């Protein structure tokens, strides 16, 4: 039977750190970008990403943008700023509420649609990150982990719109362990995940299950255990297993580039004419 300890223990965190740091160093050395900008929320994913980016590129080549809203707890902002300072990274704290407010002028804006408004907030944040990146010739380093990417638990063209994903091959529970390995405070490493897009929102509450269960199922699926055997092999109920794997399938479009309508019959040239 697979346990959560198997998932967390499936990674050598010293080697994983070195691989991610090397990946970032190589990618940026081959690009024309001067450095990186990271959106830091104060959660485990973004703080871990910032720590790895600062290690790979040096703190002078990394900027942290802390972009809270009225739904962001003060502790999250303080944690984000503390990590940026700990790694010697320049940071800015900018509330996004002032940029969200003008959207209320839209004739179809609905304040009570918390999901649509939340996705809009995520896209405002990404617009700010890319504006800063464009101004300073930087790349936007994403903070999504493997659990979120597989589930599609991110906003398309919001927090999903990035240039590079350094922790995208680590499950959420593995990111927590990586955070502890890197020396981040326990309060950050173990903090309940939340996009903070509306009052009281938590990732596990919205998903309807714990990341420990989610990661067990995703890991079992990844290593090739037949779907029908995953409940027995993980101890996770069949209905939850089905819900998790359904999200993986239904949200595949969020991980893929937009489909293009390929013209066939409408094309008038032939292979012979192309010669």
Image: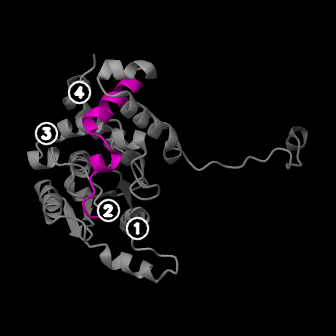
Give SS at disc 3: helix
Q: CA distance from mark 4 to mark 3?
A: 17 Å
Residue 180: numbered disc: 3
In the rendering, at what x and y percent does residue 275 appear?
86, 40
Which residue is rendered at x = 34% and y = 46% of the image?
207
Between circles 4 and 3, the one closer to the viewer is 4
> Which of 64 and 259 lies nearest the eye of the viewer?
259
CA gap between label 2 and label 3 equals 26 Å
Crowd band around label 4 with a 10 angstrom C-alpha radius: few (<14), some (14–19), many (20+): some
Q: Which mark is residue 117?
A: 1
Q: Which mark is residue 157?
A: none
The percent coordinates of residue 35 (x first, y second) are 32, 56
What is the CA distance from the residue labelled 1 to the residue labelled 3?
A: 33 Å
Q: Secondary structure at mark 2?
A: loop
Residue 185 appears anywhere in the view:
no
Q: Would you say the residues marked 2 and 1 are in contact, meaning their CB atoms lie under 8 Å apart?
A: yes
- Which circle's residue, 2 or 1, is located before the other in the chain? 1
Toward the viewer: 106 or 50?
106
**Residue at the spot x=52%, y=81% of the render?**
107
Residue 119 is drawn in which quadrant? bottom left
Whole-number angstrom distance, CA of label 2 to CA of label 1: 8 Å
- Total number of numbered labels? 4
Quarter location, residue 75: bottom left
Give me the residue at 41% from left, 54% from top.
162
Please tell me how crowded label 3 is: few (under 14), some (14-19), or many (20+) other residues with Cα within 10 Å: some
The residue indicated by pointer 4 is 4
What span is in magenta? 198-222
Which numbered marker is on residue 197? 2
Disc 1 on helix, strand or loop?
Answer: helix
Residue 70: percent from left, percent from top: 25, 71
Name which of mark 1 and mark 3 comes first in the sequence. 1
């Amino acid at each position: 039977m697979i346990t959560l300890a198997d998932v967390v223990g499936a990674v050598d965190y010293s080697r994983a750190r070195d691989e991610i740091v090397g990946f970032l160093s190589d990618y940026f050395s081959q690009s024309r970008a001067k450095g990186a900008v990271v959106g830091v929320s104060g959660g485990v994913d973004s703080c871990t990403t910032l720590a790895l980016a600062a290690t790979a590129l040096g703190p002078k080549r990394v900027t942290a943008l802390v972009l809270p809203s009225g739904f962001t707890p003060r502790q999250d902002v303080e944690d984000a700023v503390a990590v940026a300072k700990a790694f010697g990274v320049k940071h800015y704290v900018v509330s996004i509420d002032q940029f969200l407010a003008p959207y209320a002028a839209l004739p179809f804006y609905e304040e009570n649609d918390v999901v649509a408004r939340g996705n809009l907030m995520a896209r405002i944040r990404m617009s700010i990150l890319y504006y800063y990146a464009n101004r300073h010739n930087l790349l936007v380093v994403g903070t999504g982990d493997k659990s979120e990417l597989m589930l599609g638990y991110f906003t398309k063209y919001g927090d999903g719109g990035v240039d590079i994903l350094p922790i995208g091959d680590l499950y959420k529970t593995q990111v927590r362990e990586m955070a502890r390995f890197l020396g981040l405070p326990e309060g950050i490493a173990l903090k309940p995940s939340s996009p903070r897009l509306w009052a009281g929102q938590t990732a596990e509450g919205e998903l309807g299950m714990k990341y420990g269960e989610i990661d067990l199922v995703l890991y079992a699926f990844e290593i090739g255990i037949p779907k029908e055997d995953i409940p027995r092999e993980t101890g996770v109920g069949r209905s939850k297993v089905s819900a998790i794997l359904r999200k993986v399938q239904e949200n595949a479009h969020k991980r893929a580039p937009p489909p293009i309508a390929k013209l066939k019959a409408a094309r008038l040239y032939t292979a012979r004419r192309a010669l």
